Image (tube, rainbow, N blue to C red):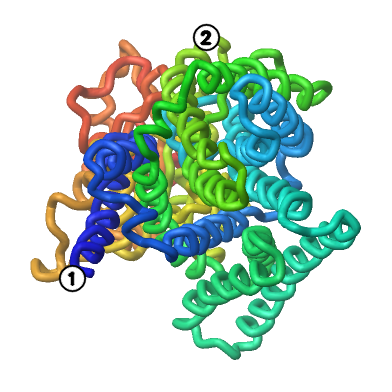
Amino acid sequence: MHDLSLKIALIGTAGIAAQWLAWRLRLPSIVLLLIAGFVAGPITGFINPAQDFGDVYQPLVGLAVAIILFEGGLTLNFREIRETSTAVRRIILISGPLVWIMSLLAGHSIAGLSWPTAAVLGAILIVTGPTVIAPLLRQARLSSRTASLLRWESIVNDPIGALAAVLTFEVFLILHGGHEASHLAMMAPLALIVSVGGGWLVARFLQWAFIRGYVAEFLKAPILLVAVLLAYAVTNMILEEAGLLTVTIMGVAIANTRIASLVEIRRFKETITVLLVSGVFILLTASLTMDDIASLDWRVFAFVAALLFVIRPIAIFIATIGTGLSWQERLLTGWIAPRGIVAVAVSGLFGSALGAMGVEDGSRMVAVTFAVVILSIILHGFSLSPLAGLLGLKSTGAPGLLIVGGSTWARKLAAVLKDLEIPVLIADRNWNHLKEARFANVPIYFGEILSEDAHHRVQFHDYSTLMAISDNDAYNTLVCTNFGPELGRSNVFQIAPDNGTSKRQAVTFTLGGRPLSDPPLTHYDLHMKELEGWDFRVTKLTDDFTIADYRESRSEENIVLLWIRPNGRLVFATTASTEPAANDRILSYGPNPRGDTPN
Protein backbone atom coordinates (compact mmCIF):
# COMPACT_ATOMS: atom_id res chain seq x y z
CA MET A 1 0.00 0.00 0.00
CA HIS A 2 2.82 2.39 0.87
CA ASP A 3 4.60 1.55 -2.39
CA LEU A 4 1.45 2.27 -4.38
CA SER A 5 0.92 5.57 -2.55
CA LEU A 6 4.48 6.55 -3.39
CA LYS A 7 4.00 5.64 -7.04
CA ILE A 8 0.80 7.68 -7.29
CA ALA A 9 2.53 10.66 -5.69
CA LEU A 10 5.49 10.34 -8.05
CA ILE A 11 3.20 10.10 -11.08
CA GLY A 12 1.54 13.35 -10.06
CA THR A 13 4.89 14.99 -9.32
CA ALA A 14 6.41 13.88 -12.62
CA GLY A 15 3.33 15.01 -14.55
CA ILE A 16 3.23 18.51 -13.11
CA ALA A 17 7.02 18.83 -13.34
CA ALA A 18 6.80 17.94 -17.03
CA GLN A 19 4.03 20.50 -17.55
CA TRP A 20 6.04 23.20 -15.78
CA LEU A 21 9.25 22.40 -17.63
CA ALA A 22 7.41 22.40 -20.96
CA TRP A 23 6.00 25.83 -20.10
CA ARG A 24 9.44 27.17 -19.26
CA LEU A 25 11.10 25.69 -22.35
CA ARG A 26 8.16 26.46 -24.67
CA LEU A 27 7.83 22.83 -25.69
CA PRO A 28 4.69 20.74 -26.17
CA SER A 29 4.05 19.19 -22.76
CA ILE A 30 3.26 15.86 -24.39
CA VAL A 31 6.93 15.43 -25.31
CA LEU A 32 8.13 15.61 -21.71
CA LEU A 33 5.20 13.55 -20.44
CA LEU A 34 6.15 10.94 -23.01
CA ILE A 35 9.73 10.86 -21.74
CA ALA A 36 8.56 10.62 -18.14
CA GLY A 37 6.27 7.71 -18.98
CA PHE A 38 8.97 5.83 -20.89
CA VAL A 39 11.43 6.25 -18.01
CA ALA A 40 8.86 5.13 -15.43
CA GLY A 41 7.59 2.19 -17.48
CA PRO A 42 9.45 0.42 -20.27
CA ILE A 43 12.95 1.64 -19.31
CA THR A 44 13.05 1.22 -15.51
CA GLY A 45 9.97 -0.90 -14.87
CA PHE A 46 9.20 1.25 -11.82
CA ILE A 47 5.53 1.49 -12.82
CA ASN A 48 3.44 -1.31 -14.29
CA PRO A 49 -0.08 0.17 -14.33
CA ALA A 50 -1.97 -3.06 -14.97
CA GLN A 51 -0.11 -4.85 -12.20
CA ASP A 52 0.07 -1.96 -9.71
CA PHE A 53 -3.56 -0.91 -9.99
CA GLY A 54 -5.11 -4.25 -10.88
CA ASP A 55 -8.80 -4.27 -11.73
CA VAL A 56 -9.25 -0.57 -11.01
CA TYR A 57 -6.71 0.55 -13.63
CA GLN A 58 -9.09 0.46 -16.58
CA PRO A 59 -12.01 2.13 -14.76
CA LEU A 60 -9.69 4.87 -13.50
CA VAL A 61 -8.41 5.57 -17.00
CA GLY A 62 -11.98 5.53 -18.31
CA LEU A 63 -13.15 8.07 -15.73
CA ALA A 64 -10.16 10.30 -16.42
CA VAL A 65 -10.75 10.16 -20.17
CA ALA A 66 -14.43 10.97 -19.56
CA ILE A 67 -13.47 14.17 -17.72
CA ILE A 68 -10.94 15.06 -20.44
CA LEU A 69 -13.57 14.62 -23.15
CA PHE A 70 -16.09 16.62 -21.12
CA GLU A 71 -13.51 19.38 -21.01
CA GLY A 72 -13.17 19.16 -24.79
CA GLY A 73 -16.92 19.51 -25.21
CA LEU A 74 -16.96 22.45 -22.82
CA THR A 75 -14.78 24.47 -25.23
CA LEU A 76 -17.21 24.03 -28.12
CA ASN A 77 -19.51 27.04 -28.48
CA PHE A 78 -21.90 26.92 -31.43
CA ARG A 79 -21.92 30.70 -31.78
CA GLU A 80 -18.18 30.75 -32.32
CA ILE A 81 -18.36 27.92 -34.85
CA ARG A 82 -20.99 29.77 -36.88
CA GLU A 83 -18.67 32.75 -37.02
CA THR A 84 -15.78 30.78 -38.50
CA SER A 85 -15.17 30.53 -42.21
CA THR A 86 -16.69 28.05 -44.64
CA ALA A 87 -13.27 26.43 -44.90
CA VAL A 88 -13.21 25.59 -41.19
CA ARG A 89 -16.64 24.01 -41.30
CA ARG A 90 -15.83 21.97 -44.40
CA ILE A 91 -12.54 20.78 -42.93
CA ILE A 92 -14.44 19.52 -39.90
CA LEU A 93 -17.38 17.98 -41.75
CA ILE A 94 -15.63 16.59 -44.83
CA SER A 95 -11.95 15.99 -44.10
CA GLY A 96 -12.70 14.23 -40.79
CA PRO A 97 -14.72 11.38 -42.32
CA LEU A 98 -12.22 11.15 -45.19
CA VAL A 99 -9.33 10.77 -42.75
CA TRP A 100 -11.33 8.14 -40.88
CA ILE A 101 -12.05 6.04 -43.98
CA MET A 102 -8.58 6.33 -45.51
CA SER A 103 -6.86 5.65 -42.16
CA LEU A 104 -9.02 2.54 -41.73
CA LEU A 105 -7.98 1.21 -45.15
CA ALA A 106 -4.32 2.14 -44.65
CA GLY A 107 -4.24 0.68 -41.14
CA HIS A 108 -5.49 -2.65 -42.41
CA SER A 109 -3.58 -2.85 -45.69
CA ILE A 110 -0.30 -1.14 -44.72
CA ALA A 111 0.09 -1.60 -40.95
CA GLY A 112 -1.53 -5.05 -40.99
CA LEU A 113 -4.07 -4.22 -38.30
CA SER A 114 -7.33 -6.13 -38.04
CA TRP A 115 -10.46 -4.43 -39.29
CA PRO A 116 -11.84 -3.59 -35.79
CA THR A 117 -8.53 -2.14 -34.61
CA ALA A 118 -8.00 -0.22 -37.85
CA ALA A 119 -11.55 1.16 -37.73
CA VAL A 120 -11.29 2.46 -34.16
CA LEU A 121 -7.78 3.81 -34.77
CA GLY A 122 -8.95 5.61 -37.91
CA ALA A 123 -11.68 7.33 -35.89
CA ILE A 124 -9.23 8.38 -33.18
CA LEU A 125 -6.82 9.86 -35.73
CA ILE A 126 -9.43 12.46 -36.68
CA VAL A 127 -8.25 14.49 -33.67
CA THR A 128 -5.40 16.92 -34.18
CA GLY A 129 -4.60 17.99 -30.62
CA PRO A 130 -5.13 21.65 -29.55
CA THR A 131 -2.68 21.19 -26.66
CA VAL A 132 0.04 20.63 -29.27
CA ILE A 133 -1.06 23.01 -32.02
CA ALA A 134 -1.63 26.09 -29.84
CA PRO A 135 2.05 26.46 -28.76
CA LEU A 136 3.20 25.84 -32.33
CA LEU A 137 0.93 28.57 -33.71
CA ARG A 138 2.14 31.01 -31.09
CA GLN A 139 5.76 30.48 -32.09
CA ALA A 140 5.21 30.38 -35.87
CA ARG A 141 3.26 33.69 -36.15
CA LEU A 142 1.05 32.49 -38.99
CA SER A 143 -1.36 34.72 -40.85
CA SER A 144 -4.66 35.03 -39.01
CA ARG A 145 -6.74 32.96 -41.48
CA THR A 146 -4.34 30.01 -41.58
CA ALA A 147 -3.94 30.06 -37.81
CA SER A 148 -7.73 30.14 -37.41
CA LEU A 149 -8.15 27.08 -39.64
CA LEU A 150 -5.69 25.00 -37.65
CA ARG A 151 -6.78 26.28 -34.25
CA TRP A 152 -10.52 25.74 -34.66
CA GLU A 153 -10.10 22.39 -36.35
CA SER A 154 -8.08 21.13 -33.39
CA ILE A 155 -10.63 22.38 -30.85
CA VAL A 156 -13.66 20.90 -32.58
CA ASN A 157 -12.05 17.64 -33.65
CA ASP A 158 -11.18 16.56 -30.11
CA PRO A 159 -14.75 15.60 -29.20
CA ILE A 160 -15.61 14.59 -32.77
CA GLY A 161 -12.76 12.07 -32.93
CA ALA A 162 -13.78 10.67 -29.57
CA LEU A 163 -17.40 10.42 -30.70
CA ALA A 164 -16.36 8.61 -33.87
CA ALA A 165 -14.27 6.16 -31.82
CA VAL A 166 -17.19 5.54 -29.47
CA LEU A 167 -19.60 4.87 -32.32
CA THR A 168 -17.13 2.57 -34.06
CA PHE A 169 -16.56 0.63 -30.87
CA GLU A 170 -20.30 0.39 -30.27
CA VAL A 171 -20.76 -1.12 -33.73
CA PHE A 172 -18.01 -3.61 -32.94
CA LEU A 173 -19.70 -4.56 -29.67
CA ILE A 174 -22.97 -5.11 -31.49
CA LEU A 175 -21.36 -7.23 -34.18
CA HIS A 176 -18.95 -9.20 -31.99
CA GLY A 177 -20.12 -8.82 -28.43
CA GLY A 178 -22.75 -11.52 -28.34
CA HIS A 179 -25.70 -9.53 -29.65
CA GLU A 180 -27.88 -11.14 -32.24
CA ALA A 181 -27.97 -9.63 -35.71
CA SER A 182 -31.64 -8.77 -35.28
CA HIS A 183 -30.71 -6.42 -32.42
CA LEU A 184 -28.39 -4.32 -34.56
CA ALA A 185 -31.08 -1.96 -35.84
CA MET A 186 -32.36 -1.46 -32.28
CA MET A 187 -29.05 -1.20 -30.41
CA ALA A 188 -27.42 1.41 -32.63
CA PRO A 189 -30.25 3.95 -32.23
CA LEU A 190 -30.43 3.06 -28.54
CA ALA A 191 -26.76 3.98 -28.13
CA LEU A 192 -27.37 7.38 -29.69
CA ILE A 193 -30.60 8.03 -27.80
CA VAL A 194 -29.19 7.07 -24.41
CA SER A 195 -25.92 8.94 -24.90
CA VAL A 196 -27.08 12.06 -26.71
CA GLY A 197 -30.42 12.31 -24.91
CA GLY A 198 -28.98 11.46 -21.52
CA GLY A 199 -26.08 13.90 -21.85
CA TRP A 200 -28.38 16.69 -22.99
CA LEU A 201 -30.93 16.06 -20.23
CA VAL A 202 -28.30 16.03 -17.49
CA ALA A 203 -26.80 19.26 -18.82
CA ARG A 204 -30.20 20.95 -18.95
CA PHE A 205 -31.07 19.79 -15.45
CA LEU A 206 -27.81 21.20 -14.11
CA GLN A 207 -28.42 24.45 -15.97
CA TRP A 208 -31.90 24.71 -14.45
CA ALA A 209 -30.61 23.97 -10.95
CA PHE A 210 -27.72 26.42 -11.24
CA ILE A 211 -29.77 29.29 -12.68
CA ARG A 212 -32.61 28.86 -10.17
CA GLY A 213 -30.15 29.07 -7.30
CA TYR A 214 -30.71 25.55 -5.97
CA VAL A 215 -26.94 24.99 -5.80
CA ALA A 216 -24.51 27.13 -3.82
CA GLU A 217 -21.68 28.72 -5.81
CA PHE A 218 -18.95 26.79 -4.04
CA LEU A 219 -20.72 23.50 -4.84
CA LYS A 220 -21.34 24.06 -8.56
CA ALA A 221 -17.98 22.83 -9.84
CA PRO A 222 -17.85 19.76 -7.54
CA ILE A 223 -21.45 18.83 -8.43
CA LEU A 224 -20.65 19.17 -12.11
CA LEU A 225 -17.63 16.89 -11.74
CA VAL A 226 -19.65 14.26 -9.86
CA ALA A 227 -22.43 14.51 -12.46
CA VAL A 228 -19.90 13.80 -15.24
CA LEU A 229 -18.59 10.72 -13.44
CA LEU A 230 -22.09 9.49 -12.60
CA ALA A 231 -23.44 10.03 -16.12
CA TYR A 232 -20.46 8.18 -17.58
CA ALA A 233 -20.83 5.22 -15.23
CA VAL A 234 -24.63 4.93 -15.52
CA THR A 235 -24.59 5.12 -19.31
CA ASN A 236 -21.92 2.44 -19.44
CA MET A 237 -24.22 0.17 -17.47
CA ILE A 238 -26.80 0.53 -20.21
CA LEU A 239 -24.42 0.29 -23.15
CA GLU A 240 -20.69 -0.38 -22.88
CA GLU A 241 -18.45 2.71 -23.36
CA ALA A 242 -21.36 4.90 -24.44
CA GLY A 243 -20.57 7.05 -21.41
CA LEU A 244 -17.84 8.84 -23.35
CA LEU A 245 -20.42 10.07 -25.82
CA THR A 246 -22.67 11.13 -22.94
CA VAL A 247 -20.09 13.29 -21.19
CA THR A 248 -19.01 14.92 -24.44
CA ILE A 249 -22.60 15.89 -25.19
CA MET A 250 -22.87 17.20 -21.64
CA GLY A 251 -19.85 19.42 -22.19
CA VAL A 252 -21.18 20.77 -25.49
CA ALA A 253 -24.63 21.44 -24.01
CA ILE A 254 -23.27 23.23 -20.93
CA ALA A 255 -20.86 25.28 -23.07
CA ASN A 256 -23.85 26.70 -24.95
CA THR A 257 -25.87 27.69 -21.88
CA ARG A 258 -25.95 31.05 -20.14
CA ILE A 259 -24.80 29.91 -16.70
CA ALA A 260 -23.41 32.94 -14.90
CA SER A 261 -20.70 30.92 -13.15
CA LEU A 262 -19.47 29.22 -16.33
CA VAL A 263 -16.13 31.04 -16.11
CA GLU A 264 -15.45 29.63 -12.63
CA ILE A 265 -16.54 26.17 -13.79
CA ARG A 266 -14.15 26.35 -16.72
CA ARG A 267 -11.32 27.43 -14.46
CA PHE A 268 -11.96 24.45 -12.19
CA LYS A 269 -12.11 21.96 -15.04
CA GLU A 270 -8.91 23.40 -16.51
CA THR A 271 -7.11 22.63 -13.25
CA ILE A 272 -8.46 19.11 -12.91
CA THR A 273 -7.86 18.40 -16.60
CA VAL A 274 -4.19 19.38 -16.38
CA LEU A 275 -3.75 16.92 -13.50
CA LEU A 276 -5.63 14.13 -15.27
CA VAL A 277 -3.95 14.63 -18.63
CA SER A 278 -0.54 14.50 -16.99
CA GLY A 279 -1.28 11.40 -14.96
CA VAL A 280 -3.13 9.51 -17.70
CA PHE A 281 -0.46 10.16 -20.30
CA ILE A 282 2.30 8.94 -18.01
CA LEU A 283 0.27 5.85 -17.09
CA LEU A 284 -0.52 5.02 -20.70
CA THR A 285 3.09 5.47 -21.75
CA ALA A 286 4.27 3.40 -18.80
CA SER A 287 1.87 0.64 -19.81
CA LEU A 288 3.87 0.06 -22.97
CA THR A 289 6.23 -2.88 -22.93
CA MET A 290 9.40 -3.53 -24.85
CA ASP A 291 7.40 -6.04 -26.90
CA ASP A 292 4.94 -3.29 -27.85
CA ILE A 293 7.80 -1.05 -28.90
CA ALA A 294 9.41 -3.92 -30.83
CA SER A 295 6.11 -4.43 -32.67
CA LEU A 296 6.62 -1.07 -34.38
CA ASP A 297 8.03 -2.51 -37.57
CA TRP A 298 8.48 -0.87 -40.97
CA ARG A 299 4.79 -1.40 -41.78
CA VAL A 300 3.76 0.84 -38.88
CA PHE A 301 6.13 3.60 -39.96
CA ALA A 302 4.88 3.21 -43.55
CA PHE A 303 1.35 3.69 -42.20
CA VAL A 304 2.42 6.85 -40.34
CA ALA A 305 4.07 8.16 -43.51
CA ALA A 306 0.90 7.48 -45.48
CA LEU A 307 -1.17 9.26 -42.83
CA LEU A 308 1.02 12.37 -42.77
CA PHE A 309 2.04 12.66 -46.43
CA VAL A 310 -0.95 11.21 -48.29
CA ILE A 311 -4.15 10.83 -46.25
CA ARG A 312 -4.23 14.19 -44.48
CA PRO A 313 -3.24 16.27 -47.57
CA ILE A 314 -5.79 14.52 -49.79
CA ALA A 315 -8.58 14.98 -47.24
CA ILE A 316 -7.81 18.68 -46.82
CA PHE A 317 -7.51 19.36 -50.54
CA ILE A 318 -10.86 17.71 -51.21
CA ALA A 319 -12.57 19.45 -48.29
CA THR A 320 -11.31 22.92 -49.21
CA ILE A 321 -12.31 22.90 -52.88
CA GLY A 322 -14.21 26.09 -53.63
CA THR A 323 -13.59 27.67 -50.20
CA GLY A 324 -11.47 30.54 -51.50
CA LEU A 325 -8.28 29.35 -49.83
CA SER A 326 -5.05 29.76 -51.76
CA TRP A 327 -3.03 26.70 -52.71
CA GLN A 328 -0.42 27.77 -50.15
CA GLU A 329 -3.00 27.77 -47.35
CA ARG A 330 -4.37 24.41 -48.46
CA LEU A 331 -0.87 22.94 -48.60
CA LEU A 332 0.10 24.11 -45.12
CA THR A 333 -3.22 23.07 -43.59
CA GLY A 334 -2.93 19.67 -45.26
CA TRP A 335 0.49 19.13 -43.74
CA ILE A 336 0.05 20.37 -40.17
CA ALA A 337 -1.91 17.91 -38.00
CA PRO A 338 0.02 16.85 -34.88
CA ARG A 339 -1.83 14.41 -32.63
CA GLY A 340 -1.87 14.86 -28.88
CA ILE A 341 -2.89 13.61 -25.48
CA VAL A 342 -6.53 12.82 -26.22
CA ALA A 343 -5.51 10.53 -29.10
CA VAL A 344 -3.23 8.53 -26.80
CA ALA A 345 -5.72 8.44 -23.94
CA VAL A 346 -8.63 7.27 -26.07
CA SER A 347 -6.48 4.72 -27.91
CA GLY A 348 -5.34 3.28 -24.60
CA LEU A 349 -8.91 2.94 -23.44
CA PHE A 350 -10.22 1.29 -26.59
CA GLY A 351 -7.06 -0.72 -27.21
CA SER A 352 -7.46 -2.45 -23.87
CA ALA A 353 -11.20 -2.88 -24.45
CA LEU A 354 -10.62 -4.50 -27.85
CA GLY A 355 -8.00 -6.80 -26.35
CA ALA A 356 -10.44 -7.85 -23.65
CA MET A 357 -13.01 -8.60 -26.37
CA GLY A 358 -10.62 -11.01 -28.07
CA VAL A 359 -9.09 -8.77 -30.75
CA GLU A 360 -5.48 -9.95 -30.75
CA ASP A 361 -3.87 -6.77 -32.03
CA GLY A 362 -6.05 -4.41 -29.95
CA SER A 363 -3.16 -3.71 -27.61
CA ARG A 364 -1.04 -2.60 -30.58
CA MET A 365 -3.29 0.40 -31.04
CA VAL A 366 -1.55 2.32 -28.26
CA ALA A 367 1.90 1.67 -29.70
CA VAL A 368 0.79 2.71 -33.19
CA THR A 369 -0.83 5.86 -31.80
CA PHE A 370 2.35 6.70 -29.93
CA ALA A 371 4.27 6.39 -33.20
CA VAL A 372 1.82 8.80 -34.86
CA VAL A 373 2.02 11.26 -31.96
CA ILE A 374 5.81 11.28 -31.69
CA LEU A 375 6.52 11.56 -35.41
CA SER A 376 3.80 14.12 -36.08
CA ILE A 377 4.96 16.36 -33.24
CA ILE A 378 8.58 16.21 -34.36
CA LEU A 379 7.92 16.69 -38.09
CA HIS A 380 5.18 19.30 -37.79
CA GLY A 381 6.77 21.12 -34.87
CA PHE A 382 10.07 21.71 -36.64
CA SER A 383 8.63 22.35 -40.11
CA LEU A 384 5.68 24.66 -39.41
CA SER A 385 7.56 27.95 -39.17
CA PRO A 386 10.00 27.36 -42.08
CA LEU A 387 7.25 26.07 -44.37
CA ALA A 388 4.93 28.96 -43.47
CA GLY A 389 7.71 31.40 -44.29
CA LEU A 390 8.45 29.66 -47.59
CA LEU A 391 4.77 29.78 -48.56
CA GLY A 392 4.36 33.40 -47.49
CA LEU A 393 1.85 32.56 -44.76
CA LYS A 394 3.56 34.22 -41.82
CA SER A 395 2.00 37.27 -40.29
CA THR A 396 3.55 40.34 -41.90
CA GLY A 397 1.81 42.87 -39.69
CA ALA A 398 3.65 44.92 -37.13
CA PRO A 399 3.95 43.31 -33.70
CA GLY A 400 1.15 44.63 -31.56
CA LEU A 401 0.20 45.49 -27.99
CA LEU A 402 -2.12 43.55 -25.68
CA ILE A 403 -3.69 45.80 -23.02
CA VAL A 404 -5.15 44.04 -19.98
CA GLY A 405 -7.61 46.31 -18.23
CA GLY A 406 -10.25 48.50 -19.82
CA SER A 407 -10.50 52.23 -19.10
CA THR A 408 -10.74 55.56 -20.87
CA TRP A 409 -6.95 55.76 -20.84
CA ALA A 410 -6.66 52.29 -22.43
CA ARG A 411 -9.26 53.14 -25.06
CA LYS A 412 -7.46 56.34 -26.08
CA LEU A 413 -4.10 54.59 -26.29
CA ALA A 414 -5.59 51.73 -28.32
CA ALA A 415 -7.28 54.17 -30.71
CA VAL A 416 -3.98 55.96 -31.36
CA LEU A 417 -2.16 52.69 -32.04
CA LYS A 418 -4.98 51.47 -34.25
CA ASP A 419 -4.70 54.64 -36.36
CA LEU A 420 -0.99 53.89 -36.69
CA GLU A 421 -1.88 50.38 -37.96
CA ILE A 422 -0.38 48.69 -34.90
CA PRO A 423 -2.39 45.59 -33.81
CA VAL A 424 -3.96 46.26 -30.43
CA LEU A 425 -6.41 44.42 -28.19
CA ILE A 426 -8.02 45.41 -24.89
CA ALA A 427 -8.94 42.52 -22.56
CA ASP A 428 -11.07 42.81 -19.45
CA ARG A 429 -13.34 40.59 -17.37
CA ASN A 430 -15.83 43.42 -16.83
CA TRP A 431 -18.14 44.12 -19.77
CA ASN A 432 -18.76 47.69 -18.63
CA HIS A 433 -15.03 48.46 -18.67
CA LEU A 434 -15.01 47.68 -22.39
CA LYS A 435 -17.95 49.94 -23.28
CA GLU A 436 -15.88 52.87 -24.56
CA ALA A 437 -13.60 50.57 -26.57
CA ARG A 438 -16.60 48.86 -28.17
CA PHE A 439 -18.13 52.19 -29.17
CA ALA A 440 -14.78 53.25 -30.67
CA ASN A 441 -14.49 49.99 -32.67
CA VAL A 442 -11.31 49.04 -30.82
CA PRO A 443 -10.71 45.25 -30.77
CA ILE A 444 -11.61 43.72 -27.41
CA TYR A 445 -11.62 40.39 -25.60
CA PHE A 446 -14.28 39.99 -22.93
CA GLY A 447 -13.16 37.39 -20.43
CA GLU A 448 -10.25 36.17 -18.35
CA ILE A 449 -7.05 36.65 -20.37
CA LEU A 450 -5.41 33.83 -18.36
CA SER A 451 -8.17 31.34 -19.17
CA GLU A 452 -8.09 28.45 -21.61
CA ASP A 453 -10.87 30.18 -23.54
CA ALA A 454 -8.48 33.07 -24.24
CA HIS A 455 -5.79 30.52 -25.05
CA HIS A 456 -7.97 29.25 -27.89
CA ARG A 457 -9.63 32.48 -29.06
CA VAL A 458 -6.96 35.19 -28.81
CA GLN A 459 -4.28 35.34 -31.52
CA PHE A 460 -1.44 35.90 -29.06
CA HIS A 461 1.18 35.67 -31.78
CA ASP A 462 -0.05 39.05 -33.09
CA TYR A 463 1.19 40.79 -29.92
CA SER A 464 4.81 41.23 -28.94
CA THR A 465 4.22 43.32 -25.83
CA LEU A 466 1.71 43.39 -22.98
CA MET A 467 0.54 46.17 -20.72
CA ALA A 468 -1.35 45.38 -17.47
CA ILE A 469 -3.25 48.46 -16.27
CA SER A 470 -6.21 47.10 -14.29
CA ASP A 471 -7.15 48.61 -10.93
CA ASN A 472 -5.90 45.45 -9.14
CA ASP A 473 -2.15 45.57 -8.54
CA ALA A 474 -1.91 41.89 -7.65
CA TYR A 475 -3.77 40.90 -10.81
CA ASN A 476 -1.46 43.05 -12.94
CA THR A 477 1.49 41.28 -11.37
CA LEU A 478 -0.07 37.87 -12.01
CA VAL A 479 -0.74 38.66 -15.67
CA CYS A 480 2.80 39.93 -16.26
CA THR A 481 4.32 36.96 -14.45
CA ASN A 482 2.24 34.57 -16.53
CA PHE A 483 3.08 36.12 -19.90
CA GLY A 484 6.70 36.93 -19.05
CA PRO A 485 8.11 33.60 -20.30
CA GLU A 486 5.96 33.79 -23.45
CA LEU A 487 6.74 37.37 -24.51
CA GLY A 488 9.96 37.97 -22.59
CA ARG A 489 10.21 39.74 -19.24
CA SER A 490 11.38 42.92 -20.97
CA ASN A 491 8.17 43.00 -23.03
CA VAL A 492 5.57 42.93 -20.23
CA PHE A 493 4.72 46.18 -18.43
CA GLN A 494 2.43 47.22 -15.60
CA ILE A 495 1.39 50.42 -13.93
CA ALA A 496 2.86 51.30 -10.58
CA PRO A 497 1.22 49.85 -7.45
CA ASP A 498 -1.06 52.02 -5.38
CA ASN A 499 0.83 54.55 -3.29
CA GLY A 500 -0.75 53.13 -0.16
CA THR A 501 0.89 49.73 -0.64
CA SER A 502 3.22 48.97 2.25
CA LYS A 503 6.36 46.87 2.07
CA ARG A 504 4.52 44.03 3.78
CA GLN A 505 1.82 44.16 1.11
CA ALA A 506 4.15 44.51 -1.87
CA VAL A 507 5.06 41.48 -3.97
CA THR A 508 8.63 40.36 -4.53
CA PHE A 509 10.61 42.15 -7.24
CA THR A 510 11.06 38.87 -9.14
CA LEU A 511 7.35 38.89 -10.04
CA GLY A 512 5.42 41.13 -12.35
CA GLY A 513 6.49 43.26 -15.30
CA ARG A 514 8.63 46.27 -16.03
CA PRO A 515 7.49 49.79 -15.03
CA LEU A 516 5.18 51.26 -17.63
CA SER A 517 6.37 54.84 -17.28
CA ASP A 518 8.96 57.09 -15.73
CA PRO A 519 7.88 58.64 -13.43
CA PRO A 520 5.65 55.76 -12.30
CA LEU A 521 1.91 56.19 -12.72
CA THR A 522 -0.71 54.38 -10.68
CA HIS A 523 -4.26 53.59 -11.77
CA TYR A 524 -5.44 56.56 -9.72
CA ASP A 525 -2.85 58.82 -11.38
CA LEU A 526 -4.08 57.83 -14.85
CA HIS A 527 -7.66 58.56 -13.87
CA MET A 528 -6.80 61.98 -12.43
CA LYS A 529 -4.72 62.99 -15.44
CA GLU A 530 -7.61 62.06 -17.70
CA LEU A 531 -9.79 64.46 -15.71
CA GLU A 532 -7.10 67.14 -16.10
CA GLY A 533 -7.26 66.79 -19.89
CA TRP A 534 -4.03 64.91 -20.57
CA ASP A 535 -3.86 63.23 -23.93
CA PHE A 536 -1.68 61.11 -26.20
CA ARG A 537 0.46 62.70 -28.86
CA VAL A 538 2.45 61.14 -31.70
CA THR A 539 5.50 62.99 -33.00
CA LYS A 540 7.78 61.84 -35.81
CA LEU A 541 11.50 62.55 -35.54
CA THR A 542 13.49 63.60 -38.58
CA ASP A 543 17.10 64.50 -39.34
CA ASP A 544 16.21 68.13 -38.65
CA PHE A 545 13.93 67.46 -35.65
CA THR A 546 15.94 65.25 -33.29
CA ILE A 547 15.15 63.82 -29.87
CA ALA A 548 16.93 66.79 -28.28
CA ASP A 549 14.71 69.19 -30.20
CA TYR A 550 11.69 67.15 -29.17
CA ARG A 551 12.52 67.41 -25.47
CA GLU A 552 13.06 71.15 -25.70
CA SER A 553 9.64 71.56 -27.32
CA ARG A 554 7.76 69.66 -24.63
CA SER A 555 6.91 70.53 -21.04
CA GLU A 556 8.66 68.79 -18.17
CA GLU A 557 5.43 66.98 -17.31
CA ASN A 558 5.31 65.25 -20.70
CA ILE A 559 5.90 61.48 -20.38
CA VAL A 560 7.38 59.51 -23.26
CA LEU A 561 5.78 56.07 -23.12
CA LEU A 562 7.25 54.45 -26.21
CA TRP A 563 8.38 54.99 -29.76
CA ILE A 564 7.58 53.09 -32.91
CA ARG A 565 10.36 52.01 -35.23
CA PRO A 566 9.86 52.29 -39.02
CA ASN A 567 9.29 48.50 -39.09
CA GLY A 568 6.45 48.85 -36.58
CA ARG A 569 8.35 47.52 -33.55
CA LEU A 570 7.36 49.07 -30.22
CA VAL A 571 10.16 50.28 -27.95
CA PHE A 572 9.15 51.28 -24.42
CA ALA A 573 11.08 54.11 -22.85
CA THR A 574 11.58 52.36 -19.51
CA THR A 575 13.47 49.44 -21.09
CA ALA A 576 15.07 51.10 -24.12
CA SER A 577 18.83 50.81 -24.47
CA THR A 578 19.10 53.48 -27.19
CA GLU A 579 17.57 56.87 -27.91
CA PRO A 580 14.83 57.39 -30.53
CA ALA A 581 16.28 58.12 -33.98
CA ALA A 582 15.14 59.75 -37.19
CA ASN A 583 11.90 58.31 -38.63
CA ASP A 584 10.88 56.93 -35.22
CA ARG A 585 7.46 58.04 -34.02
CA ILE A 586 7.31 59.00 -30.35
CA LEU A 587 4.08 58.32 -28.45
CA SER A 588 3.86 60.51 -25.38
CA TYR A 589 1.29 61.31 -22.73
CA GLY A 590 0.99 64.76 -21.30
CA PRO A 591 -1.04 67.89 -20.77
CA ASN A 592 -2.74 69.19 -23.88
CA PRO A 593 -2.05 72.92 -24.25
CA ARG A 594 -5.03 75.12 -25.07
CA GLY A 595 -5.51 75.34 -28.80
CA ASP A 596 -3.03 72.54 -29.46
CA THR A 597 -4.18 69.25 -30.95
CA PRO A 598 -2.46 65.88 -30.75
CA ASN A 599 -0.30 64.93 -33.70
Q: Residues within 10 Å of mark 1 (few under 14, many from 20)?
A: few
Q: Residue 596: x percent and y percent?
A: 44, 40
Among the two numbered marks 2 and 1 on one chain, the one whose residue lies closer to the N terminus: 2
| Residue 208 showing in the rendered view | yes
Pick the residue in front: 95 or 259: 95
Residue 442 drawn at (x, y percent): 57, 45
Position of residue 528 relative to residue 206, above or below, is above
Q: Quadrant of the N terminus?
A: bottom left
How many residues crowd around disc 2 within 10 Å: few (fewer than 14), some, or many (20 or more)?
Answer: few
The foreground one among 515 and 286 is: 286
Q: Secondary structure at mark 2?
A: helix
Name the residue at the left extreme: 503
User: What residue did someone put label 2 on?
Assistant: 390
Q: Amino acid at mark 1?
A: Gly
Q: Residue at x 88, y 62 (%)?
A: 186
Q: Between residue 48 and residue 579, name the one nearer to us.
A: 48
Question: At x 71% / y 70%, what residue is drawn?
Answer: 238
Side of 243 where 262 appears, left or right: left
Quarter-of-image position of residue 541: top left
Figure quadrant of residue 514: top left
Work out which residue is located at the far bottom of the displayed protein and give it.
214
- The residues tagged by marks 2 and 1 sit, at their Cα atoms, a distance apart of 54 Å
- Please provide percent x and percent y for residue 227: 57, 75
Residue drawn at x 68%, y 75% is 202
Q: Can you tell which quarter of the image residue 432 is in? A: bottom right
> In the rendering, which numbered label is found on residue 500?
1
